Amino acid sequence: MLELHHVSREFGGLAALCQVKMVVPQGKVVGLIGPNGAGKTTLLNCISGLDSPTSGEIIFDGTPIHSRSPHRITALGVSRTYQNIRLFKEMTTLENVIVGQHIHGRSTLLHSMFVWPYHWREESRLKKDALALLERFNIGSVAHVHAGTLSYGDQRRLEMARALATRPRLVLLDEPTAGMNAVETHQLGEQILRMHADGITVVVVEHDMALIGQVCDEVYVLNFGEMIANGAPQAVKQDPKVIEAYLGHED
Amino acid sequence: MDINVPQQLVNALWLGGLYSLFALGYALIFSVLGLLNLSHSAVFACGAFVGLYTACGDEVFTTTCTELDRPIWIVIPAAMIGAGIVSVAVDRVAFWPLRKRNAPRMNQLISSIGAAALLVNLLQIQFGAAQQRFPFGSIPNDPVSGLPVVITPIQITALVIALGLMFALRILVKRTRLGREMRTVAFNERVASLLGVNVDRTYMTAFFIAGALAGAAGMMYGLAFNSMTPFMGESVSLKGLTVIVLGGLGSIEGAVIGGFLIAAIEVFSVALGRSDIRDAFVFLLLFVILVVRPRGLLGQGVEDRA
Amino acid sequence: MKTLIRTIVVLTFALVAVVPFQVQAQDGGGMGAWDGCPVPENLPEEVTIGAVFGLSGNIAAYGEPQKRGVELAVAEINEAGYLGEGTTLIAVFEDGGSDGEASIAAMDKLIAENELAAVIGPTLSAQAFAADPIAAENGVVVLGVSNTAAGLTTMNEDEELDQFIFRNSLPEANVIPNTITKSTEILGLERVGVIYGNDDDFTLSGYDAFADALEASEVEVVRTETFARGDVDFSPQLTNIINDDPDAIVVSALIAEAVPVVLQARQLGYTGPIIGGNGFNSPALFAQGGEAAEGVIVGAAWNIGSPSELSVTFTETFTEAYGAAPDQFAAQAYTGAWLVATAIRCADSADSADVREALAAIVDYPTPLGSFSFDETRNPVHEPVVQIVQEGMFKLLTEETAAQAFGE
Amino acid sequence: MRVAIVIDIINAIFEFIFNVLNGALDPILTQLAEIGFREPVVQFMLINAILGLSIYMTLNCGLFSLANAGFMAVGAYVSVILTQKYDAEFGLSLLGGALAAGLVAIPIGLPVLRLRSVYLAIATIGFGEIVRIVVLNVDTIATDLFNPDEPIELTFGARGISRIPKLTETAHLVFFLILMGYLLYRMQRSRFGRAMTAIRQDEKVATTLGINVVYYKNMAFILGAMIAGVAGGFSGHATRIITPKDYGFDKAVDILAYAVLGGLGHWSGPIIGGMALKAIPERLRYLNEYTGALTGAVLLLIIIYLPSGLVSLGQPSFWRRGGRFEGARRLAGIGVALIVLTNMLPLRNLGSDEVLLGLEYWHLWGLGAGVGLIYWITSRQPASTGGRFSLPMSAVTGLLALGLIIAGLIGRIDQPGDGYYVLVFGLLLATAAGVIPYAPQHTETPPAEQVEGSHA
């Protein structure tokens, strides 16, 4: 589904990513771990199009996407969340999700101006879908609250709901459990498994090994921009290179 | 139609000095606050009029001032200090309340316009809208003899002062503790205050220096062109903007180089016979620079600064 | 049919206007003692005239002297009882700002809130184009005292509306040909350089007039340069012009730019004549220009050094009242107020329609500007002057003064 | 033939609409005229409102563009030339102006909209100046280039185009404004508008949600340009003369001020801001040369005390946030500073018989007794102070102003922060107006007494 070939990203001579190779098979949940500053977020940025690799190829479903603009990548079926939550704080929870459905709407300015029946139908359809998504993440009760006022956990969940609103085939989750307690983390793990069950491929960047163990089929380990190991979660944990990379590290 | 190249070079050089002098303060405020301070041109006019009042006293209100009450070497520093104080007051009134609550830059731009309108109109109420000048002979104005080109002492003075202040400012920013503090504040206000920098005082100092530079520029304009009105800053304001964009927003050397470059473009578009679209060249350059290289000639990558 | 009616109306207007008021000043009558019309008897206690001048912003440099000119005239008129015993003339001022919108608002407000005999102003020609139709549509006479743009008094589609629009400011097109012929004659000009402000309607029409007059006088223009309003440095343009070694530099500028142009031309070593238009006609020229202004030739509608009794009295009283010498803006506004008052006196009515007719009938009226009449398109007719700056004063340009200035 | 019928029908419809509107507007205009806003002023206020909407279009998409004055110029010149030279119908000429402005916006927008914040602002300032210079010189340059027998006269340079027929009517403006208000109202609730809001709030997230940022930014820019073009057409046909200097840098910044002053929280903000910025100087007109200074001060005060613009006055959160008295105290700050200003500036020179805020000066002190009441009302039920009094409008404003002084003073005691602004304001003005000595040449006494007087 997603293949990265020799992807490098340099910032003014400093290599954030170096010849990264990665294969994410269709329908799997793949973990991406590594110490802070290993280049995990840069990698996600390159896949989602916010950043482009200095060299190498990123192929999604047979289509090279490393030089595409982000909105076109999203249209192909890639969606993501952010490590530091980036919601539209001045919009309501519901509106955040509806914005996420942008590519599935067709109504234009003229439609809405002349109150085309088509526009109403589309609006109510989008709203229904969005509410369903909110229910799925248990935040339906705060649908009409400004996103900026939501609790931290709800904001995290809303971000995932919004990512799913684009109806992606591949979801990139950037530390979805940061700042969550064990119970919340576990619930989130179940949400990820539900996505998996729906046939969505997931790449999840995490520090929480419990979650990785809970959801991932395969784990990649990134250290100083280089992919140092990959394999099943249990196997990777034993890998001496990984232990070395994490030496002295809490996780 | 041949061109008097040496004379036009002199024209360009000293006009460049004036533009740079005006743009220095503009650039300083931008580098520290990331703020376009459109009241800079009003402070500039204030400087000129503080100078005039120091030089002539109450006489300026009634008639044309005919002789200096105080020597010129007192008048210039007085204008600089006066403009500096005005500049700090503008900061306190127009920017500080907004900065305190992290208002959008756009609001600060508008409040700087409000401050400019207030200042310029106050000047008009006190001094009238008609043009004023420094007394004849405030500074020797006869061309330096024995040269193939016409160049007057005031032109040389303006150039020397512009370059001198530029070097002084450069040393201040790069070498001194104050300069370090300014750069830290410019980088990140919160980090600076965590590092023990008195952020507010740094802003005040920056505004004072910028104001003093504007005051010096105002004095040089007043002395050189003998035509001061409360509105004298208006036409320079946009030129100054072009200058700092060309040089690189917030870069001090950039402001100077930009100043000379803009002056050269203006003078030579006139010299080549297109004085009617002289300003079009300037703004076209501004436009192209922004599209091609938004950080200007010497600017660092401060793309996301506002 | 419509045209026919209109023609008849216009003709009637013209007839009515000319016949009963064809009066001229008597010999020896100064301003305030004009006995061409009897002392009016039917005027109310208060007669109001409006004035729209730019009093805020940088336009105040022109609007302020205009206001003073009108104030002075009104004070004199009341003191002399010019409108008859028990009748006071009141001038209501309204700030016309510096753009069309503000002048429209000012004119509209003035007319709505006052019963006006006439309006004086607005300051700029562009403002007049915007605001004068409002006065005309309301049947109020408007007298421009500083509008010099071409076609101002014939701006409306409807000629009847035009009948209400007057001006006493001699357009550049009347002043400049005279200036050029006279200075060519006296100084023997053959090649000149021209510099003008190309972003201002006043300086641009000045330039047009200069260009035409120079062509008519067969003077070669070796170089034409432009500047923008608010510019302070003119050395590049002047360097170009001086480099071509012209016999004279012709400048179309307002006083704010005129002074630096003159100063910088002299600084660059140019000693020949500099010729300017109405915009130069301000005491600021030699007050600010000092020695550099010597030898500057100014074609204008009014000469501050004019020996005429009215002009001398005006200059003296103005200087005494305001502590500064009047400029042309003040003189024309002062004259405007007197013209309006005269029309009110002659019409013996404060009704604007009557005032209009009386104003149109003014012929050979003695004013500080000279002997003054309106022509059939309500434009001023009087002799323009050509002056030269000498020893810090305006003097009339003659063979002698020219010889003194340029040592020929 | 068919086309003619369609045009007739359209004309009839419009005629009907404007008749209805005129009927509704008449009493309103009469009322407005009574409080000093006569029809021409109302028209310019409405044109400002349209301009406010045009900049709202771009700001709502996060674009800090100052190009609208330039587009206004394009619209004004094109539509005026259409009506004057080609006898086009007014509506068509407006459409032409809008299209021309939109067409110009396309090649400008594509390179420039990549820029952010201040860089975009400066680039668009450059664009505006280029437009102005082109309009100034297009005649001479075209004549030079094509060298025709007669000089080409299109824009008439600095002379401007004069003798424009006055076609703009208040009903037209109201109609267009309602139309645009409706458009924006619909837009905010549509896919299109949501995409723009998303871009303003977080461009990067918006793009990873599949929103084509470049497309929407350009659309916003073009739509803003077209609205500005229409405003230009309206203003040209209202002032009867257009000159290039009407559309310079000052105008560009003015338009931005409409949006900031009114507030961007709601589409009505720029409308209110635009109208206020015309109304405030008009209300202060009697101050003549002091109008400019006071308008500048009002602008500053609003920015400082009402950071989210005038619309925030209508939002409950403004009154609640920061305690019960916060909103009242902010207004109080404005009041105090205004009083300080008006006292220091004009009244000193104008004499005591002049009016202040529509109230005779001595009334102010006489009405001091009502102060406590007013403060009480403003602090508790701020929304209801409007039309309850049977006092004349001017008395209410005066009372409010006076109440606000006291409120401001109390506010200063409550919280030093607020009073500080006022103090600094006072100090600045004291330096400006007090230290620099009073200028005798500005005395406003009529010169009659002075002619023989001792004035030297």
Image (cartoon, rainbow, N blue to C red):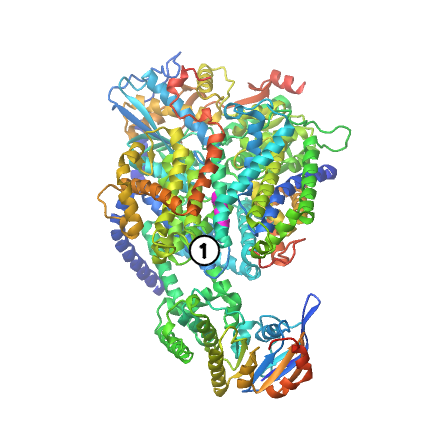
Q: Would you say B189 lies left or right of A195 here?
A: right
| Image coords of residue A114 (percent x, y) | 36, 67
Q: Is residue B70 above or below residue B215?
A: above
Residue D364 visible within the image: yes
Quadrant of the frame with the N terminus of chain B? top right
As rendered, which of C6 and B61 lies closer to the eye?
Answer: B61
Q: Would you say B157 lies left or right of C129 here?
A: right
For the point 59% across and 37% down, which residue is it?
B215
Res. C352 image quadrant: top left
Q: Is residue A101 above or below residue D362?
A: below
For the point 55% across and 85% down, which residue is it?
A213
Span shown in magenta? B108-114
Label 1: state its secondary structure. Answer: helix
Q: Which chain hosts label 1?
A: D
Quadrant of the frame with the C terminus of chain B? bottom right
The residue that disc 1 covers is D55
Q: Would you say C80 lies left or right of B110 here?
A: left
